[in-house]
Image (cartoon, rainbow, N blue to C red):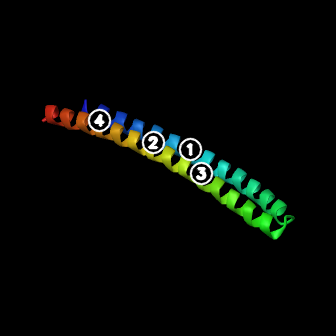
Amino acid sequence: PFLRLLEAQLQDQRREHEKEVEALKKQVSAMEEELAEQQQAFLQALQLSPEAQIDFGHQQEIARLTRENLDLKELLEKLEKHEKKLRKQLKIYIKKGEDFE
């Protein structure tokens, strides 16, 4: 029973790892797309007047910070959910360990 519990835990960790790898791949892809968009915007900004370039730069920074805030909020929610799951698993494992003794 205890070995099966450990096997199940290992499988759960493997699945979580695979999910994290997939999420990181998606994040890299999104960052590549964002970089391409920023390069295009930069090329367009070079054609603007100095005043318009400043305004455009401010707009780009506001958009970047907004995206970053949303990403951080999403990450925080994910980490809180994962923490809750781990705490629940820990309680189960502690109880099963006590029962095993």
Q: Disc 4 or 2, which lies upstream in sequence?
A: 2
Callout 4–callout 1 Cβ contact below 8 Å: no
Amino acid type indicated by mark 1: Ala
The residue that label 4 is drawn on is 88
**Front position among marks 3 and 2:** 3
Residue 80 appears at what percent x and percent y? 39, 43
Amino acid type indicated by mark 2: Lys
The residue sitting at 60% across, 50% down in the picture is 67
The residue that label 1 is drawn on is 23
Task: Quadrant for residue 8, please give it.
Answer: top left
Q: Disc 3 or 1, which lies upstream in sequence?
A: 1
The residue that label 3 is drawn on is 66
Amino acid type indicated by mark 3: Thr
Q: Is residue 78 left or right of residue 90?
A: right
Secondary structure found at label 4? helix
Q: Disc 1 or 2, which lies upstream in sequence?
A: 1
Callout 1–callout 2 Cβ contact below 8 Å: no
